[in-house]
Image (spheres, coloured by chain):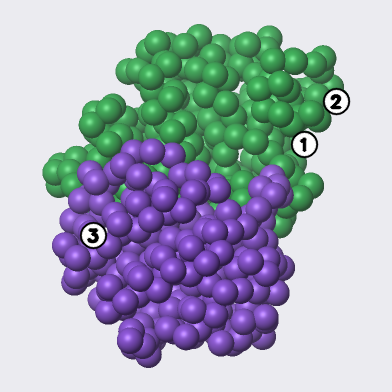
Chain colours: A green, B purple
Amino acid sequence: MIDANAFLGEWPFRRLPYAQPEDRLRKMDALGIEKAVVSRLENVFYKDLLVGNEELHAIVRRYPDRFIPAYTINPGFPGWEHDLEVCINDFGMRNLRLHPNYHQYSRLKGNVPRMVEARGYPNYQQYHFLDDQAQALLGKAEEHDLVVLISIGVEDPRFAHWLMKVPSVTMIDAAEAVNGFPGVRFLVCGAVFSEVTSLWSTAYHQDNLYFENSRVQGPIGDVDDLCALMGADHLLFGSNLPINYAESAKLSIEYAEVDAAVKQALFSGNAERLFGA
Amino acid sequence: MIIDVHVHYRSDAQLAQALCQAERLDMVLCLNTINLESTASPHFPSMSFVTACNDRTAAAAREHPQRVIPFWYLNPVHGDAACTELQQRVAQHQGPQGVKLWMAVKGNDSCVDPVLALCAKHRLPVLQHTNIEAGGTLPTETTPQEMREMALRHPDVTFLWGHAGSDFEYGVKCALGLGNVFMDIGGNEATNGYTELLVRLLGAERVVYGSDTTGRSFASQLAKVYGPDITEEEREKILYKNAAALFGRQRYD
């Protein structure tokens, strides 16, 4: 099995098991997960993302056969070009992680009223993909053939800290990226069922669009329905560890009423193809 | 064996799907119905709507007696009519059963008391929807604090604490020291540490598996039982032993 969406590191609001590499490897072994695509969890909140990326690089160098790094860049923060350059040149970056909702920069940039109104969160703005800097970053991703992981949401909003009410990235925003860069391979992470179906139906180009199932936790028959909608080639097993129980994504595929070959594709085949793992 | 204490269905097709999966997983479904075929679920249902919902539940229980335990949906605002509805359902069913209260009125409202008195009489477990989250609650949703008040005021009623409060870290603290509640783990995302926290603070004796399917998948909610770092004995209690004991001491006459 290949876990297409996971994090290493601590979450500020709750002590989570399997946050550190050695614990994670034990959990992966117990579940039969050979490799995991990982980002630094602290980079959801850090401003200087290079710190988290350096830590991630050090971990991955210790376990190159188990962890596939996805380095995090915030195009809304000054100096992102430098971070990207370091990640590409020094760390051999192949995969790029984006958190458009957590990496809002309303204090740094002008308002985008459409975004504010759409969500009903008066003080909230995320960067959106039509922004110059986001466009430039996606252009770089295309130039370097990076797989782009867009994190739609990281945790169940019911559990959010009262000072951290961060809405999910909207599917309009995600579609702006997907539709604007048909040459880029996108893995949409942390989307719930309705978000997956919504983005799939609004994407102009679906060949390079992939989803993982960590937060697809219903309705009944969810994996079956997504395979029927998108075909089996566009859905990947993802745990969202350490935030979620990995068993949710695993059992969801195991219980699905699809062929063994389809399950194999979801558990590993699609990820092998996407990440060259 | 598994007992799922929290199951709804929106359409007959979804019920068939749930029953099919329940068969494969050797699962008994505590089924309540809060909508008619493919309709929305009104927060403030009329008496006739409630009765029609319960007719669907009763039919499912009759057709699948090995797989379905009916939970009668009630809107306590309807007073005597709600009590009559419950009395009739209990008299007709004569088997394991329970009651579902949703969000027509807060659970600690005095208008709920007559319904709960009947539940005490028949030893019917009461599944009460609860919710609190940073995003806010609806005006008539029962918060964990109100659920606590409800449980303290009715010590002779056994409550299934729906969604463990939604914000489970908040909910579990409100449940401390209560001997008549079971935390239903269904409905929210399978978040690491969730079940471990409930077991650590309340004991596995106070936790029951629920899924909130068909809105949720069984798989994602069973992950809260199969994923946590707990003992096999604790897992069995959560999966079925606690719930089975509840139904084992019911009186139907």
Q: Secondary structure at mark 2?
A: loop
Q: Give the Cα separation between the discs numbered 3 and 1.
A: 55 Å
Expressed as whole percent of the image width and height from the top left, the position of residue B47 reads 46, 53
| Amino acid type indicated by mark 2 | Arg
Of marks 1 and 2, which one's residue comes earlier in the chain?
A: 1
Q: Is residue A3 above or below residue B229?
A: above
| Amino acid type indicated by mark 1 | Lys
Expressed as whole percent of the image width and height from the top left, the position of residue B85 reads 41, 65
Residue B60's tag is 3
**Protein chain holding label 3:** B
Q: Secondary structure at mark 1?
A: loop
Q: Residue at x 36, y 53 (%)?
A: B53
Is residue A150 left or right of A100 when viewed as pictured?
A: left
* Direction right: furthest residue: A107
| Amino acid type indicated by mark 3 | Ala
Expressed as whole percent of the image width and height from the top left, the position of residue A63 reads 47, 53
Q: Give the Cα separation between the discs numbered 1 and 2.
A: 13 Å
The residue that mark 1 highlights is A47
> Which quadrant would residue A90 be assigned to in this image?
top right
Q: Residue at x 27, y 79 (%)?
A: B94
Query: Label 1: how many residues lie within 10 Å, few (<14), some (14-19) or many (20+)?
Result: some
Q: Quadrant of the C terminus of chain A?
A: top left
Expressed as whole percent of the image width and height from the top left, the position of residue B125 reads 45, 77
* Residue B185 or residue B214, whichever sits in front: B214
- For the question of whether residue A169 can be seen, the reply is yes
The residue that mark 2 highlights is A107
Q: Residue at x 50, y 9 (%)?
A: A180
Q: Is residue B194 above or below residue A227?
A: below
